[in-house]
Image: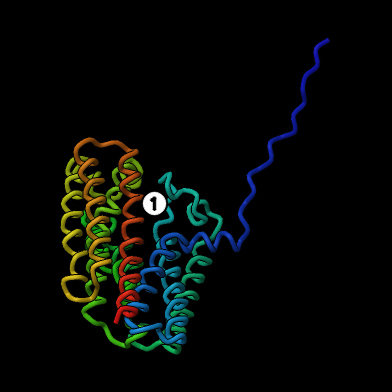
Amino acid sequence: MSETAVHPPAAAPTRPSRARQYYVLTKPRVVQLIVFCAVIGMLLAAPGLPPWREAIAGTIGIWLVAAAAAAFNCLIEQHIDARMARTAWRPTARGELTRPQTLLFSALLCTAGCVLLYLGANALTMWLTLATFVGYAVIYTVVLKPLTPQNIVIGGASGAMPPVLGWAAVRGEVGHEALILCLIIFLWTPPHFWALALYRAEDYRRAGLPMLPVTHGNEFTRLQVLLYTFVLFAATLLPFVSGMSGWFYLASALVLGALFIVHAWKLWRAYSDALARKTFRFSILHLSLLFAALLVDHYLGLLLR
């Protein structure tokens, strides 16, 4: 007589803890890069080490407001996220957090961040950070993203603000050096994001978002990625040309810029999802190493004086 194996029922997937769900709303990886760029702005704004009070308050305050903007973005795009493989796992898309819970969480983070920036840094930093919140969470997410394929270009202005915020936290003003850093991130954003959009085009099509690969096609988007890397390359030379940095940064910018152009050139010549992913990942490395080189150059200059 044969025996029938009895298997225990499969365990239901474990729901993340409530704290974990709220943490995911803040888009930690994105916010980490934002805070990194803001801290670079703080360090470059000081002749030595920045004043600890403004630096700590600025770092935490900018993190809180950036996290609030990310949570608000999840709230607004709840139904869009649910239709996209890349974002369907978010707590709002899965219905694990309600809209009132998410809105309250975002409001608390934004309020706490603004208060900390006002009391610990200065009013200018608070207002600039709040304007960045509105630019990303409202103007980009609510207005631009569903309206135009140039959403990421126009909306990139808010994403380029972190070094300006960091600079303002330490100096209490916005110098031309901070605006150069802002310009670099502004021009970096389109090739970075469109590389992602290329291999996620079907996701955006299903979600009904007019991203450039959806509205203008794969080949046109690849050309735009390549052209923007050339413009970005020129912008990354401005810190050296303006006297903000020295030879170490220049050498780093030349190498990193050339590598980004090579990635974009290969992507333009022969497309594959794997190459688009590789270009997207390199773009993150490019910006991180570029700003790190600027920081190393800054302190090398101080040591050699």
At label 1, which amino acid type do we have? Answer: Ile
Quarter of the rendering occupied by the N terminus: top right
Mark 1 Cα within 10 Å, few/some/many (few <14, many 20+)? some
Residue visible at 29% across and 44% down? 198
Residue visible at 61% across and 61% down? 18
Q: Residue furthest front?
A: 304
Q: In this orientation, which residue lies closer to the viewer: 220 or 6?
A: 220
* Left or right: 212 in relation to 79: left
The residue that disc 1 covers is: 80
Residue visible at 29% across and 68% down? 160
Q: In this orientation, which residue lies closer to the viewer: 262 or 74?
A: 262
Look at the image and name its color scheme: rainbow
* Numbered marks: total: 1
Q: To which quarter of the image does residue 124 belong?
A: bottom left
Quarter of the rendering occupied by the C terminus: bottom left
Q: To which quarter of the image does residue 278 belong?
A: top left
* Left or right: 131 in relation to 215: right
Q: In this orientation, which residue lies closer to the viewer: 86 or 269?
A: 269
Q: To which quarter of the image does residue 205 belong?
A: top left
In the image, residue 105 sits, relative to residue 86, either above or below, namely below
* Left or right: 28 in relation to 220: right
Q: Secondary structure at mark 1?
A: helix
Q: Residue furthest right?
A: 1
> Is residue 210 among what the camera can see?
no
Percent across and percent down for residue 240 are: 20, 70
Residue visible at 39% across and 57% down? 77
In the image, residue 303 sits, relative to residue 15, either above or below, namely below
In the image, residue 170 sits, relative to residue 10, either above or below, namely below
Percent across and percent down for residue 304 are: 31, 78
Percent across and percent down for residue 145 are: 28, 58
Percent across and percent down for residue 75 are: 44, 61
> Is residue 33 among what the camera can see?
yes
